[in-house]
Amino acid sequence: MSVWGIVLGILLGVVSIAIIVVIILQEGNQQGLGVVTGVADSYFSKNKARSIDAFLSRWTKVFAAIFVLFVIALNVLAHFDIL
């Protein structure tokens, strides 16, 4: 295995862990559950979706795109016997 294969493999592992962490940090969409439990939606909970959840959603997309690029790069290097 070449240096490029090792480096891309390590970066792929780091990005995989980052995706897992970002997804775990996101809250589930339980809209309408407050009606059942009797808890009303507050102003903070309504605007929270635009701050924290939007930030985590954006980074999930970024890490997913990086993950796909690293997988494609590893496959191309393996196809041309560079690894």
Image (cartoon, rainbow, N blue to C red):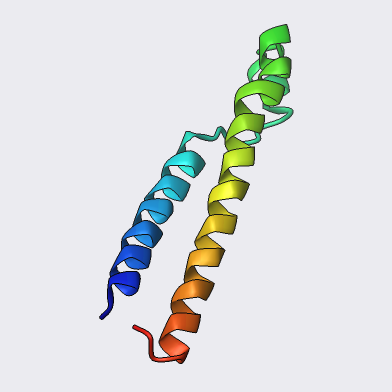
Relative to the observer, which residue lies in front, 32 or 47? 47
Relative to the observer, which residue lies in front, 23 or 65? 65
- Quarter of the rendering occupied by the N terminus: bottom left
Q: In the figure, 80 relative to 66: above or below?
A: below
- Residue 3 in the image: state x and y as whole percent: 28, 71
Q: Residue 43 sits in which quadrant?
A: top right
Q: Is residue 45 left or right of residue 9?
A: right
Relative to the observer, which residue lies in front, 82 or 65? 82
Q: In the figure, 82 relative to 63: above or below?
A: below
Q: Residue at x 48, y 40 (%)?
A: 22
- Quarter of the rendering occupied by the C terminus: bottom left
- Residue 66 in the image: state x and y as whole percent: 54, 57
Relative to the observer, which residue lies in front, 52 or 7? 7
Q: Residue 53 sits in which quadrant?
A: top right
- Residue 71 in the image: state x and y as whole percent: 48, 71
Q: Residue at x 49, y 73 (%)?
A: 73
Total tally of numbered discs in the picture: 0
Q: In the figure, 66 relative to 53: above or below?
A: below
Q: Is residue 8 left or right of residue 67?
A: left
Q: Residue at x 57, y 45 (%)?
A: 60
Q: Residue at x 61, y 31 (%)?
A: 55
Q: Is residue 79 left or right of residue 4?
A: right
Outermost residue on the top side: it is 43
